[in-house]
Amino acid sequence: MKIFKLTAILLTVLVAASCAKKVDIKPPEAFDPEVSFKKANQLIDKRQFETARRELESIKGKDRGMKFAPLAHLRVADTYMLEGEPEPAVEEYRRFLVMYPAHKYASYAQYQIGMIYYGQIEDHERGQDAARRALEELAKLNELYPRNPYRESLVYYTEKCLDTIADHTIMVGNFYFKKRAYEPAVRRYLEVLREFPGFKGEEEAFYRLVISYLRLGDAGMAEEYLNRLLEKYPDSKFAEEAKKEFARPEDEKG
C-alpha cells in the first residue's frame, strides 16, 4: 500500500513537471531606444507633452548605447518650450550643455536659450532685461560654437536686442529731460552713446545733450556735442533745432 502511494506521488510530480515544460514563457522584449524615441516624438506632435516626457526619461535611463539619451534630454527641453514654459526649458537646455558640451546639437541648445529670452522682449519699457540676457546668450553661442548654423540670423537678433536696450536708455533719459532733471538725463544719453555708437537714435542723443548742457550752464560741452551732431548728421532736423537753441540769447535758453 505504501509502495502504491509513493508511486502515485512520483507519477503526479512527473506529470506536473512534464506540463511545466510545455508552458511557453516569453523572455521580456529588449528595450529599443529608437522605437521609444519615435513614440515620444509622435506624442510631442500630438502635444501630449507630459506623456512624451515620461517616454523620454525612460530613454535617458535605459539607452546603454548613449545614442538616443542625449537626444531625449534635448527633446525634454523642447517639450517645455513648446508648452510655453520658458524657465524649465532653459534649465533643461543648460543641463544638456553641461552633460554634452561637445554634442553636435549643443549649438542648438545654446541658440534656443537665447531665443527664449529674445521672445520675452515685449516692448522697450519692459524688454530691456530680456534683451540683455538674450544678447548675452547669443554672444555665448558665437563664442563657444563659432561654426554654428545660426550665424546669419544672429546678426538680425543681435541688432534687435541692441536697439531695444538703446531705445530704453534713451526713453529713460527723455523722462528725466522732460522733468528738467538734466544731470541724470545727461548720464543716460552719454551711456547710450558709449555702449551703442552709431545706433539709430544717436542723433537725438546728441541733440538732447546739447540742450541739457546748455540748461546746465555748460556751453563748452554743449558746443562739443553740437559739433559732433553737425559732423555726423548735418541735414538732420535735430541738427537744425540744436543750432537754433545754441544761437538763442542766454536769457531765452531753458
Image (cartoon, rainbow, N blue to C red):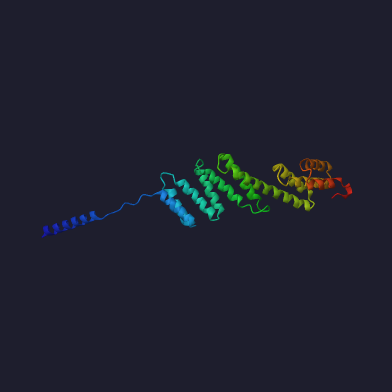
x then y, percent, for residue 69:
45, 47
Q: Position of residue 221 (x, y in %)?
A: 81, 42
Q: In the picture provided, is 99 more to the left or to the right than 180?
A: left
Q: What residue occupies the far left of the structure in this picture?
A: 1
Residue drawn at point x = 47 percent, y = 49 percent: 72
Q: Is residue 91 left or right of residue 160?
A: left
Spot the residue most to the front: 235
User: Of 236 and 170, which appears nearest the observer?
Assistant: 236
- The percent position of residue 167, horizontal first and vertical second, equals 70, 49
Q: Which of the 4 quarters of the picture holds residue 139?
A: top right
Say if 67 sits above or below 22 in the image. Answer: above
Q: Give the quarter of the figure containing the N terminus.
A: bottom left
Which of 72/156 is in front?
Answer: 156
Left or right side of 144 for 189: right
Give me the residue at 89% from left, 49% from top.
251
Residue 31, given in percent of the width and then of the height, sits at 38, 50
Instruction: Write down the quadrant of residue 150 in the picture.
Output: top right
Q: How many marks?
A: 0
Q: Nearer the viewer, residue 39 or 94?
A: 39
